[in-house]
Image (cartoon, rainbow, N blue to C red):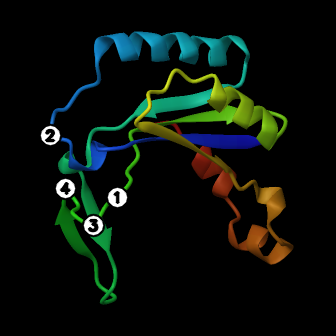
Amino acid sequence: MRFMMLMIPKGYETAAPGTMPDAKAVEAMMEYNKELQKAGILVALDGLHPPSMGARVTFASGKPKVTDGPFTEAREVLGGYWMIKVKSKQEAIDWAKRCPAGPNEIIEIRQVQEMDDFPEDVQKAAAGFGELQNAKR
């Protein structure tokens, strides 16, 4: 089972462009990342620039509309993520509890949908999805 652990730092929604984390916090997080890797469960991880450097594309009118960040209506935004492969949701929770997150951070855990989770008609409609997932960047 694959799970995304989504880091949601409170206040990041209003962070200025170029805002960077504290070096001590990064050092502690790197130790945690190494533990995930040593355990053989780390699939991917990345940190994200603040929303003030991003853009959103919405389709409310049926046509794409681009809005540059920051996004005033955002209450919670992602600061980064880990993709892990573990045996259960409880194991993902246990790993999230070990994270050296601060009091202003939340980790949301979401299971990744696997092709086997879908009915046959959806699997057929998604033919070729595996090749897209494994495409080289």
User: What is the C-alpha distance between the residues marked 4 and 3?
Assistant: 9 Å
Nearest the camera: 100 or 110?
A: 100
User: What is the C-alpha distance between the residues marked 4 and 2?
Assistant: 9 Å
Q: Is residue 67 left or right of residue 21?
A: left
Residue type marked 4: Pro
Secondary element type, mark 4? loop
The residue that disc 1 covers is 75
- Earlier sequence position, callout 1 versus callout 4: 4
Residue type marked 1: Arg
Q: Are marks 1 and 3 in contact (CB under 8 Å)?
A: yes
- What residue lies at 30% left-to-right and 12% top-to-bottom? 23
- What residue lies at 19% left-to-right and 67% top-to-bottom? 67
Residue 60 higher or lower than 15, as above or below: below
**Residue 41 placement: quadrant:** top right
The residue that disc 2 covers is 17
User: What is the C-alpha distance between the residues marked 1 and 4?
Assistant: 11 Å
